[in-house]
Image (tube, rainbow, N blue to C red):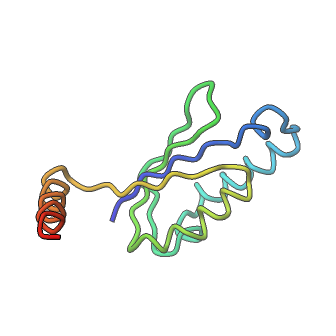
């Protein structure tokens, strides 16, 4: 299963971080990039991007299940980032799921 993770730095931290704090976060990110499977059990980091002149990151992970991402998301939160986790699925699959959901709602 593929998930998109968007990590956004919380506001007060965004402008008040000291260089030492940035270096600590950078070192954590280097460890993630070096051995992603040690950070997310059974996971593969497909891609990772940082927004130019913004304090957010965008990652795509291929993981066995959603629960594999929870410890990583908690670590990112402790580093000062809020996280959005979005399931990636082909449009055809999404439309079929949406149709089933709408039919089930219609029956209620």
Viewer-proximal residue among 57 and 15: 15
Image coords of residue 96 (percent x, y): 12, 59
Q: Which residue lies furthest to the top in this view?
A: 53
Residue at x-position 71% and y-position 55%: 28
Residue at x-position 59% and y-position 68%: 39
Image coords of residue 63 (percent x, y): 41, 68
Residue 57 is left or right of residue 11, and the answer is left
Q: Which residue lies furthest to the front in this view?
A: 108
Figure quadrant of residue 40: bottom right
Which quadrant is the C terminus positioned in? bottom left
Residue at x-position 88% and y-position 38%: 18
Viewer-proximal residue among 24 and 93: 93
Figure quadrant of residue 55: top right
Total number of numbered labels? 0
Viewer-proximal residue among 106 and 82: 106
Which quadrant is the N terminus positioned in? bottom left
Image coords of residue 7 (percent x, y): 58, 47
Image coords of residue 29 (percent x, y): 66, 52
Residue at x-position 79% and y-position 38%: 12
Instruction: Answer above or below: position of 105 versus 33.
Output: below
Figure quadrant of residue 101: bottom left
Residue 19 is left or right of residue 83, and the answer is right
Residue 78 is left or right of residue 104, and the answer is right
């Amino acid at each position: 299963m593929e998930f998109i993770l968007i990590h956004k730095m919380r506001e007060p931290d965004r402008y008040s971080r000291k260089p030492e704090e940035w270096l600590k976060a950078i070192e954590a990110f280097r460890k993630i990039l070096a051995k992603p499977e040690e950070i997310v059990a059974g996971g593969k980091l497909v891609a990772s991007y940082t927004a130019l002149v913004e304090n957010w990151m965008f990652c795509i992970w291929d993981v066995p299940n959603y629960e594999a991402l929870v410890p990583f998301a908690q670590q990112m939160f402790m580093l000062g980032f809020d996280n959005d986790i979005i399931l990636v699925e082909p449009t055809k699959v999404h439309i079929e799921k949406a149709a089933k959901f709408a039919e089930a709602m219609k029956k209620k």
